[in-house]
Amino acid sequence: MQTKLLLSIFLLPVFLGNQTGNQTGNQTGDPAYTESTFVNFPSITNGPVLPTGGLLIDAAGHLYGSAQGGVNNLGAIFKVTPSGSVSVLHSFNGSDGSYPTVSLIRDAAGNLYGTTSQGGASADCSCGTVFKLAPDGDLTVLHSFTGGYAYPSALTLDSAGNLYGFEYATNANGSIFKVTPEGTFSVVYNFCSLSNCADGSTPVGSLIINRAGNLYGATNRGGEFNQGAVFELTREYAETVLYSFTGGADGGNPVGKLTQDAAGNMYGVTYAGGSTPSSSYGTLFKITSAGAESVLYSFCQLTNCNDGARPAGALTLDASGNLYGTTILGGTNNAGVVFKVTSEATESVLEDLTTSADGGNGAVLDKSGNVYAEIYSGGKNGQGSVLKLTEDTDSPPQCDIRARIEPENCRPRE
């Protein structure tokens, strides 16, 4: 069965049709982006279909991801070359896991690490796995979950080779687990350990780690106002809430992974809240390591939410401090957008997704500044695609009264 396995806490599915070669505009007069469908799944026999979780990109521009499909129709790990060629790195068979649904991570040696939502060697349930995939294609199951469906998150790797993630088999409110390079599993923190879940509940996305080895993440629920929280877990596994969302202008119900800059500031999105007068369709926020939170952008500021609504998925930070991401609603077609928020907190829409779009998986960038987004469904075959956006630096910016661009110096909107 091909299903998109997600925790039912925030995401609403939408889908994207094929729009090859469409030139798109934005809200600020920035250069336009040319959109093309980089990959249509399945592009090879027994290939990946219905990709989930978002993309990973390496220094050479290769993309990696998780999907359903594969030889056994139980899920696959795929690779896409810079020219758009797709290959299956591993097809799951059930005992080594099945139905991977989250993004991958990669170490310096080229090993990939991830989790599956089902499968494994457990005799009591098909609860999911933690795996390592070597460059030669050899897959090692580091841990098979027991006791119930774990719905494990994407992973984080520390300098000693230990893996950390979230799971729900041990504790219905969510736990943080650790897996050593040898495969020893332990739970290092259980959420909702404090009264009224003041320490957070329902962790989302994945963890990030700083040079000192402290872990940071977000929860969708809990905190002081039960609207989610950003937390720190020290190397000694002591948890501290850095910020509790109120659900008001500061946002509410964080989703996706935090992104950290060189100064230690963290960036993320909330599914709800914001300062838009008539609604609360989510925010993009910044939080310092000391816990000072500020909202860089509140979505749905334009008529009909043409700037996007309900952001979801991970953010990508470029060298200039610009942030890229996706929403699952809003835009011209109310099917989500790919957006950019500059270091000056100005938002622009790089691409309006159409019907049959799923923009909840975030975006990644290559060294040339091309933006890639994974689409769960849609595409030429209705089985998913990878969208590529290339900045059209030769074209003048679009006419925009708010940007005060004179008509003779800009091109009309399509």
Image (tube, rainbow, N blue to C red):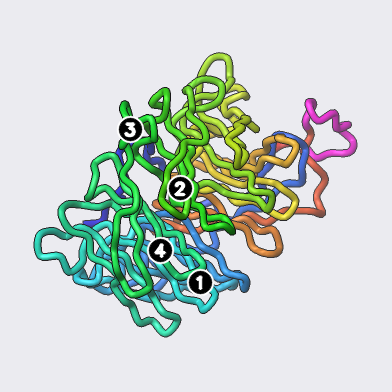
Q: Are marks 2 and 3 in contact (CB under 8 Å)?
A: no
Q: Are marks 4 and 1 in contact (CB under 8 Å)?
A: no
Label 3 Cα neighbours within 10 Å, binned few <14 / some 14-19 / many ≥20: few
The residue tagged 1 is 107
Dot 4 or dot 2: first in sequence order is 4
Q: Which residues are magenta?
A: 400-411
Q: Are marks 4 and 2 in contact (CB under 8 Å)?
A: no
Label 4 Cα neighbours within 10 Å, binned few <14 / some 14-19 / many ≥20: many
Q: Secondary structure at mark 1?
A: loop
Look at the picture and state if 20 lies above or below 139: above
Dot 2 or dot 3: first in sequence order is 3
The residue tagged 2 is 233
The residue tagged 4 is 163
* Residue 133, x across and y down, in percent: 38, 75
The residue under the point 48% across, 29% down is 244
Real-space CA distance between mark 4 and mark 1, rounded to the nearest whole angstrom: 11 Å
Q: Secondary structure at mark 3?
A: loop
Residue 194 - label: 3
Tell which of 119 and 305 is nearer to you: 119
Label 1 Cα neighbours within 10 Å, binned few <14 / some 14-19 / many ≥20: few
Amino acid type at circle 1 is: Asp
* Residue 116, x across and y down, in percent: 30, 61
Dot 4 or dot 1: first in sequence order is 1
Real-space CA distance between mark 2 and mark 1, rounded to the nearest whole angstrom: 22 Å
| Direction bottom: furthest residue | 136
> Hey, which quadrant is residue 300 in on the image?
top right
Real-space CA distance between mark 3 and mark 1, rounded to the nearest whole angstrom: 35 Å
Dot 3 or dot 4: first in sequence order is 4
* Residue 400, x across and y down, in percent: 77, 31
Would residue 69 be visible to someone looking at this image?
Answer: yes
